Image: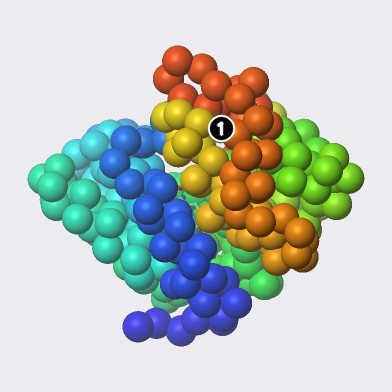
């Protein structure tokens, strides 16, 4: 096992948060449209050598590997349980140009200058030292290599986050802080990536609904086990899990569509170049 410096994240993603995401991110790809937009922006060709940072259960890594049959995709993540799923799915799909490694992207000893592109779908907002982390990722890229990732815009623009939590909090909207929104400010994000050595940093808005389940029961189950909802439950002794379930079902009902529960999301699709 390589060095880990983001120990809090390591504990979360190898504990409740990782188990939760592994359970709900298995099987059918959720949010495939977002992943497709990410991979199109990454400009993957048949021989591309790609890194997927915070790959989770690896759906984006496998999709990238299929676009690069003569290249290679390496998925890196902290979470053993999510990587287990990622490897099993790659094996079942017969993909031989994809590998998954457990490690901390902030300090992982990537082969230097060996990758054409590094992508991430919501896996790069959690670094304790983001400049160090993006610099480390930049070192892995060849000169002219590209960094392409998705991260959420400001919290209040993300109904998928605000609506369920406001419903549980009686509309008071005491939204728990979340590292998920650490890259939401485009000026800060651009300054940070520039400090880390990237150029031509371009955050473009990408607003697509987020899907958290194929029906109300599944979406409610997803939210009940998620970190932000667990935080609200912990600080609200009167809110029983049964009451929370009822409130969530009512809050999510307006977003129910024939193919699942889809709630507006607001993201940045960020592209940057390593000089
Ligand atoms: C919100 S999940 C996204 C997972 C996946 N990319 C997806 O879209 O389904 C964030 C992922 O980032 C990973 N992660 C967080 N900090 C990390 C770090 N320092 N190094 C590597 N992975 C990290 C977590 O383990 C988790 O799998």
Q: Is residue 243 visible?
A: yes
Side (left or right) of 254 relative to 237:
left
* Residue 155, percent from left and from top: 77, 43
**Residue found at x 44% / y 72%:** 14
- Give the position of the N terminus as an image quadrant: bottom left
Residue 147 percent coordinates (x, y) = 53, 48
Q: How is the image coloured?
A: rainbow
Q: Nearer the viewer, residue 144 or 92?
A: 92
Instruction: Residue 137 in the image: state x and y as whole percent.
Output: 52, 62
Residue density around tag 1, few if under 14, some if 14–19, many if 20 or more, within 10 Å: many
Q: Is residue 52 above or below residue 159?
A: below
In the foreground, 131 or 225: 225
Q: Is residue 38 above or below residue 78?
A: above
Q: How many marks?
A: 1
Does mark 1 have its CB less than 8 Å from ligand 1? no
State the residue in front, 183 or 257: 257
Query: Which quadrant holds residue 186?
Result: top right
* Residue drawn at the location 51% of the way across and 17% of the way down: 257
Q: Which residue is mark 1?
A: 210
Could you tell whether 18 is left or right of 81 in the image? right
Give SS at disc 1.
Answer: strand
**Residue at 63% in and 60% down:** 230
Q: Position of residue 25 (x, y in %)?
A: 39, 46
């Amino acid at each position: 096992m390589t060095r880990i410096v983001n120990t809090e994240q390591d504990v979360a993603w190898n504990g409740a948060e990782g188990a939760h995401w592994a359970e709900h991110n298995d099987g059918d790809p959720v949010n495939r449209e977002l992943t497709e937009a990410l991979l199109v922006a990454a400009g993957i060709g048949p021989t591309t050598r790609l890194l997927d940072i915070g790959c989770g259960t690896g759906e984006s890594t496998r999709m990238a590997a299929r676009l690069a049959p003569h290249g290679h995709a390496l998925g890196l993540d902290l979470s053993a349980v999510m990587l287990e799923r990622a490897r099993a799915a790659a094996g079942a799909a017969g993909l031989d140009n994809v590998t998954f490694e457990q490690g901390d992207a902030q300090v992982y000893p990537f082969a230097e200058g060996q990758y054409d592109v590094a992508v991430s779908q919501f896996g790069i907002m959690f670094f304790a030292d983001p400049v160090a982390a993006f610099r480390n990722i930049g070192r892995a890229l060849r000169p002219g290599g590209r960094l392409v990732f998705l991260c959420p815009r400001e919290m209040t623009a993300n109904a998928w986050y605000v609506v369920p939590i406001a419903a549980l909090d009686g509309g008071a909207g005491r939204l728990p802080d979340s590292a998920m929104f650490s890259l939401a400010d485009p000026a800060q994000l651009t300054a940070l990536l520039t400090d880390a050595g990237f150029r031509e940093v371009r955050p473009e808005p990408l607003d697509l609904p987020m899907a958290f389940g194929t029906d109300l029961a599944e979406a409610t189950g997803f939210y009940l086990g998620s970190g932000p909802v667990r935080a609200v439950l912990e600080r609200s002794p009167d809110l029983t899990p049964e009451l929370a379930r009822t409130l969530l079902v009512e809050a999510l009902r307006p977003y129910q569509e024939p193919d699942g529960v889809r709630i507006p999301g607001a993201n940045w699709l960020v592209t940057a170049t390593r000089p």
